Each structure stands twice: as C-alpha cells, then as structure tokens.
Amino acid sequence: MKHFMAWRATARMCLKEKSYFGLANIIAQYLLRAAGLGALLMIWRSLFMQGADMQGLSLNQVYVYTILSTVLAPLLDVRTPASGWLHDGSVLKLYLRPRSLFAQLAAHTVGGWVLPLAILSFPVMGIALLCGVDLRPASLWFLPSLVLTVSLGFAVDYLFACLLIRLNNLEWVVHDMRQSLTALFTGSVIPFAALPWGLGRFLALTPLGSLAGGPLSIYAGLAEPMPVLAAQLFWNVVLWPLALWRFASMRERMVSYGG
Amino acid sequence: MADKIQSVLRLLRLYARMDLNWVLQDFKAALIVVCAEIINNLTAVSGILLLAVRFGGAGGLNTDEILLMLGFFEFADGLCYMLFGGFNVLHISRRIGRGQVDHMLIQPRPLIVQLLTEGFMPVSGSGGFLIGILLTMLAWTRLHLEVTLLRLSLLLLYTLCHTLLTLGQSFLFGSAAFRTPVASEELSSLILDLNSQLGRFPLFGLPRWLIGLLCTVLPVGLLAYLPSLALLGRLTGIVLALPVCIAAAFALAAACCFRAGMRHYLQYSCNRYKGIGHRS
C-alpha cells in the first residue's frame, strides 16, 4: 500500500507538471492533434468517395482505427520522460530517491496520460459517437493486446533511452527519428491492411509493428487476434530482458548537459 | 544598401563555414544527424505516398501528382529549414520565451541581419532540401511536365511564398512569447508541427468552407497543395495569386506583432536564467 501511495503521488506530480507551459500551450497541442485526426478522416472519406477499390476495408473500420489511434495515443506509443531527463540531467534525481528507477519512470508516464485522456480522448469519442461512428470493438481480445502493447512500449522506450546515451545525448535527433519511425512502422497512422505490396503483413511481425497496429487492428476487425497476440508476446519476452540489460550497462556512460 | 547586402553575405559565409566545421570536427555525429534527417523526411512523405500507391491516388490526385506535391513540400520546407533552421530562428518563440533576445541585442549587428543569417545551415540542414529536389525531379519526369519559364517562375514564387508563410506564422504566433514567455515558449514549434502535419495532405474532397479556411486563416493548403495544382496547370486566374497575397499578409502581420512585442520586451525584458546558468 505504501509503495502504491508513493507511486500515485509521483503520478500526480507529473500531472501537475504537464500544465507548466500554460493553458495556451496545452490547448494548442490538443487542437493540433484534433486537426491531424480530422485531416486523416477527410483523406479516408475522399478515398471512399472517389470510388477507390478498398479491398475489403469498410469506411467504418478505418474511421474506428483512426479515431482509436488518437484516443489511445499515449498508451500506444509509450513515452517515458527518460530521454528528456537524460538530456537535461534530471535523471540524477531518480537515483537519489528510495524507489526503483523503472517504477518512478512508469509513475511519471502514467501521470502524463491523465491530461490527454481527459482533454482529447473522451471528447473525441463523444463526438465520434454523436456523428454515428460505430465504436464497438470487433473483438475483446484487443484488451490483452493493449496491455501487451503498453508493456512493449516501455521496453522500446528504454531501448531508445539507451540509444540516446550511446549517441552522446543527441536528443533531438533520436526524438525526431523515433517520431517519424513510429508514425509509419507502428501502424499508428495508416492501418497495415491499407499498405501496398503486402508490406503490412511483414510490418505486423516486427517489434514496432506490434505496438499500435496490434490492438487497433483487432479492435477494428482488420486482423485475427491470435497471430497478433503471439507476435506481441514474443517481442515482450525478447525486448524486456534486452532493455534491462542494455540500460544497466549504459548507466556508466550517462552524461548530461544540465540547465 | 550595397554594404548591408555585403555584410549579410559575409555573415552567411561565416555561418556556412561554422556549419561545415561542425561536420568536420565531429564527423560521426554529423553523419548521424544527416542520416536521421533523411530518414525523417522519407518517412514523412511515405505515409500519404503509400496510400496513393495502394489506391491509385488520393485526394483527387494520382500517385505521380501526389509525388510532385510531396516533393514540392520537402523542397520548399527543406529550403526554409536550411536557411532559418539553426539557432532556433525558425522556432523564434523559444528564443523570445527563454529571454535569449538579450543575447542578440548585445551583438554589434542589427536584429534583422542576425535573424536573416544565423539560422543558415547549408551542410547539416540540407537533407530535406536535397530529398525535395530529388522527389520533385522524379515526379516532374514521370508526369512528363514540360520545363517552361512560367512553370519555373511559379516554382520559385511558390517556394518563396512557402518560406514567407512558414516564417510569418512562426513569428506572428511566436511574438506572444514577448508577453507570456513561459506559456508561449513552444508556440512556434506547434505551428510548424501543424504545417508539417497538414501541409502534405491534398485537400480535394473537403467541404468548401474548410478548403477556404485551410487556404486563408490556417494556410496549410498553400504550402504544397495549391502550388502543385498550379504547377500541373490545373489552376488559372486569380487563384494563382492567392499564396502570394496570403504570404504577404502573414509577413506583414508578423512584422507588426514582432515590433510591438519588441517594444514590450525592451521595457520589461524576460529574465529566466539563474546565476548558475540554468533556466527557470
């Protein structure tokens, strides 16, 4: 219980920290995401309107996929503060506290989910329902798939933190590269089923492809649950030990700028 | 006037040499940065391009026309980044909000000259620009577009408009940081992200009012979609002048707001640095 209270207090601290840059920044951030979602929905609509051969995909399925990718965005692409704190030196304070490093990072991350879920996710779901989008899941297997995605997301994030340490704190480079790689290869923007040349079938088996694409495809009924869950389980088993081992060995290489 | 131009050119040369020196001093890091930038730009265009390939086009454009639009976006945006990407000139709200305008005011150069020159990164920041040239040339060839003086003039004109629109929006919204430094520190980045996210989308099929909005108040449609339609010869008449008018309006509004903000800054400043060098 004591551990949980400490964990909850850290998460609450992080929630408060998210409003540090003020209301203008928060509103602009969420408007930006909402605009991105709107643009993508319009693209799908125009594709269907121009009579493109969607090869089995229905408009509702791609709508559900796209809306859910925005609604669950923080869970589908887990970003702990590790990379930023490595860069500015804040990571040192984690070592001074009587809690494990990973538990503290996890608490901060979960605290950071509250604001986007409250400000963006619930309103978007409400608007989608009012617009007549059928948001019912095609299969409840998406729930265990989402849990595996979150778990895998933490492992992938720690591996990116290791990469950052290895590249001597080129934070923006790693951040930008990750941003563009995850947008395309995790299936968070375009469903794998909509990619040409059977590219999606290959990407779904990769570690990045097991992140957002997995639960979203199951939810929208674009993929069979069992192969997706098997791939996610496999990458969890492989990447978690790797992330822990690499993080432990990289700890000696940590260098921060501070300030 | 000639002196001023010479001074600007001399500074541009200086910043170009500094950029090259950085590459030569830490070749490994520079290589990583350039490769990462190439990957970023390729993946940024891949999403919409893959959709176009799979469905034989998107948003009223066929695959090659989409390629031209994406190529133009990368080319114009890459040029803008290469010219103004360094030292957060493009992300001006960061400089203002962090109180770093003080650093510029003590330099023995006019502010405008510093803003025009210090962001120049022809070596480390040219990835997007080069990819843009390659994609535009590839699309141009595949579409069998004739190289005419009119087309080349339009290409240059709309590239200039793209740069003015990007800078104009960044400086216009970024000027809010003069009054609310902490809250508005990242406003320019948010605007640039919005441009980058929506500027690559074709607008065909959207409701008319939305197209109107996206070509005036929030001019993401003028960054690549409208220029590419003009290059394809699908636009005629007064619409061709729309990017020029809107870019001029944004540039003018940005200049006015920046001046007003500077007046406020000269009176109140913005002290966010502590004695030990950390920022609050």
Image (tube, coloured by chain):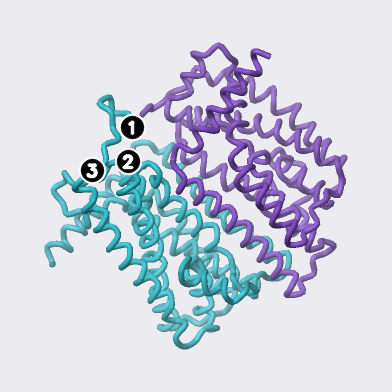
Chain colours: A purple, B cyan
Mark 2 highlights which residue? Answer: B98
Q: Residue A119: x, y in percent? A: 60, 46
Question: Disc 3 is attached to a residue of which chain?
Answer: B
Q: Nearer the viewer, residue B246 or B149?
A: B246
Q: Is residue B256 above or below residue A22?
A: below
Q: Earlier in the sequence, mark 1 or mark 2?
A: 2
**Amino acid type of disc 2?**
Arg
Circles 1, 3 touching at the beta carbon (< 8 Å):
no
Mark 1 highlights which residue? Answer: B279
Q: Residue B171: x, y in percent? A: 34, 57
Residue in the image at 55% along x and 11% along y:
A98
Q: Which mark is residue B269?
A: 3
Residue in the image at 23% along x and 51% along y:
B264
In the image, is A230 to the left or to the right of B51?
right
Residue B121 in view of the camera: no
Q: Nearer the viewer, residue B50 or A148?
A: A148
**Amino acid type of disc 1?**
Arg
Residue in the image at 26% along x and 41% along y:
B270
Q: Residue B261: x, y in percent? A: 27, 54
In the image, is A120 to the left or to the right of A206?
left
Question: Disc 1 is attached to a residue of which chain?
Answer: B
Q: Nearer the viewer, residue B115 or B152?
A: B115
Q: Earlier in the sequence, mark 1 or mark 3?
A: 3
Circles 1, 2 touching at the beta carbon (< 8 Å):
yes
Q: Are discs 1 and 3 both within one chain?
A: yes
**Amino acid type of disc 3?**
Ser
Q: Residue A1: x, y in percent? A: 68, 14
Give the quarter of the figure containing the C terminus of chain A: top left
Q: Which mark is residue A148?
A: none
